[in-house]
Image: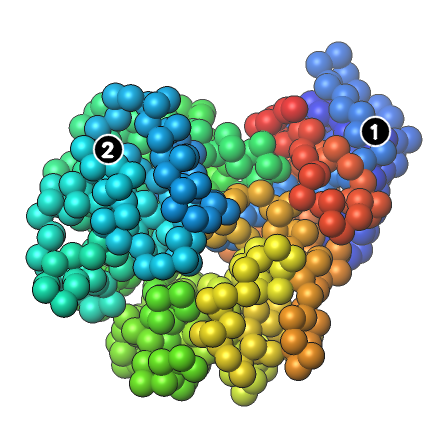
Amino acid sequence: MTAADLLITNARVLTMDPARPRAGALAIAGNRIIRIGTDADMGGLKAKHTRVIDAGGKTVMPGIIEGHVHLFGGAVELETLMLNGMSGIDQVAEAVAAYRKAHPHDGVLLATGIAHEAFGQPITRQILDRMVSDIPFIMGCFDHHTMWANTKALEAAGIMQGRVLPVGNEIVLDHNGIATGELREPAAYMLVQALTPTGGREWLGMTTGENPTPPATAAQRELDMSFFRKGIDHAASLGITSMHNMDGNWYQLELLNTLLERGELNARVEIPFHQKNTFEIARVEEAAEMRARYQGDMLHCDRVKVFIDGVLETYTALMLEGYPDQPENMGAPLFTAEELNEIVRRADRHGLQVSTHAIGDGGVRRTLDAYEAAQQANGKRDSRHRIEHIEMIDPADIPRLKQLGVIASLQPIAGVGVPGSPHEPILSRVGDKLPWSYAWQTLREAGATIAFSSDWPVAPLSPFLGMQAALTVVPIRPDCPPQAQSLMDTLHSFTAAGAYMEFREDRKGTLKEGYLADVVVLDADMEAVPKTEVVNVRPQVTICDGRISFEA
């Protein structure tokens, strides 16, 4: 009989295994779970080296699978000025002044997390100049689709008079042809991100899909790997054992592989090939090369990431009809229907999964059409293609997710009915379509597979914040159906559904004998915690691949 390296006892184990949904204890040897059962069932597995973790009657569950994250960018932002939740010019100015006092030698000030409407007026370079005028000051929106820069930053980047950019990206100019300070989408804001200490390398996987040019030096690579370690440590402290990254390039894979070879990769990471609208369509074939080179349980590539549209806040989400407050504007598609169809067809032919950012109902329709076209061209298979966000969906498209086997990869913290979340500008953008916006339960009841995530650093990484949002969301109009989730559905969407989404439900996402030992021991009984207090739950121990990656 194999002795256990770790025994977790006196637990309320929620396994996510329908055949055995509950247990009281589990045993781990190496990187596998070797027994699930009661405390008495663990007899004979304890040896001199065995560590016993008494869960104190609290919840033990599968390690959380974060299904939509920007790991590198989020990790770097752990060290930047965070403005989340702030409103008013004075409050932000005070935060900026305090940060500068604490960091007097910084040559560039980078802040993030602000909302479009935070100042009660359009954000301009002149407003930022009043806060910081002597060094470049760059302030990012929480959604990471817009940034604002002061005059110093715009001058340093050489874009005061604008620049021709790819479709969907814009340096906003005033009536005199001078930059206002607003930079929409990556091709615009990366021009000022290049001024930061990292040179914006953390966002290349999203903004260009390319490696750093010129290539990163040895010192820069070490710096960037240190950020990855910090980001993964942060994730482990929140019970996360796996992450699906939503931006990708060869550089990130190389850095993570180096950490893996050094024994320093403490979470499982999946990196996609990011097919940009600046690429030739044939470049999607490169994803198959990534998959061939990186195919392990700790680090792998099996997916192509695509953006079909932008976001509601900037009127760039693709709509089926014009926006209620801009009837002539239907959004900004990043690919034509024909281009997207061909990208998906090629990726699908290689057996690759495609995940498409689609926020507007027009973006969702175009994405579903592309997935259906791939089935018709290549034959139906277990493709598990994904749609990221689905903030709006036309009622006619709701049943298509189940019919096509498409996974809804959703971020509950984004819901407009989440207590404490602002209703504007979203209500003005969706208008009468609110009943089919953020329709998590509607999609679930229609048979779609639902996986939850954060979209960190667009939102905080904490899965417990997302869980509380899913549990407590309320209709904000009488015509809106309830979208609140049950506890077990919520936990399933943060664990087993994430494993299914990456074709690894045969080894993780569930606490089951023979499965990978990815486990989190919480400081509370999730079934007893009030819905409005779930955000306060914390991991006591996080275990990834049989190793303790975090301990309180």
Give the side of residue 486 with respect to residue 144, left or right.
right
Left or right of 94, for residue 22? right
The residue that mark 2 highlights is: 108
Question: Tag 2 or tag 1, which sits nearer the N-term?
Answer: 1
Q: Residue at x 35, y 31 (%)?
A: 97
Tell which of 521 and 257 is nearer to you. 521
Q: Quadrant of residue 152?
A: top left
| Percent position of residue 285, x then y | 26, 62
**Rendered position, 95 above or below 147:** above
Residue type marked 2: Val
Q: Residue at x 50, y 40 (%)?
A: 268
Q: Quadrant of residue 199?
A: top left
Dot 1 alpha-carbon crowd within 10 angstroms: few under 14, some 14 to 19, many 20 or more: some
Which of 102 and 434 lies nearest the eye of the viewer? 102
Label 1 – label 2 distance at C-alpha: 48 Å
Q: Quadrant of the C terminus?
A: top right
Q: Look at the numbered disc 2 and give the secondary structure of its residue.
A: loop
The kind of residue tagged 1 is Gly
Q: Residue at x 20, y 37 (%)?
A: 133
* Secondary element at tag 1: loop
Q: Position of residue 306 (x, y in %)?
A: 34, 64
The colour scheme used here is rainbow
Residue 390, given in percent of the width and then of the height, sits at 50, 69
Location of residue 35 by image quarter:
top right
Residue 290 showing in the rendered view: no
Q: Residue furthest right?
A: 40
* Residue 56: image tag: 1
Residue at horizontal 23 percent and vertical 23 percent from the top: 219
Height in image: 366 above or below 245? below
Quarter occupied by the N terminus? top right
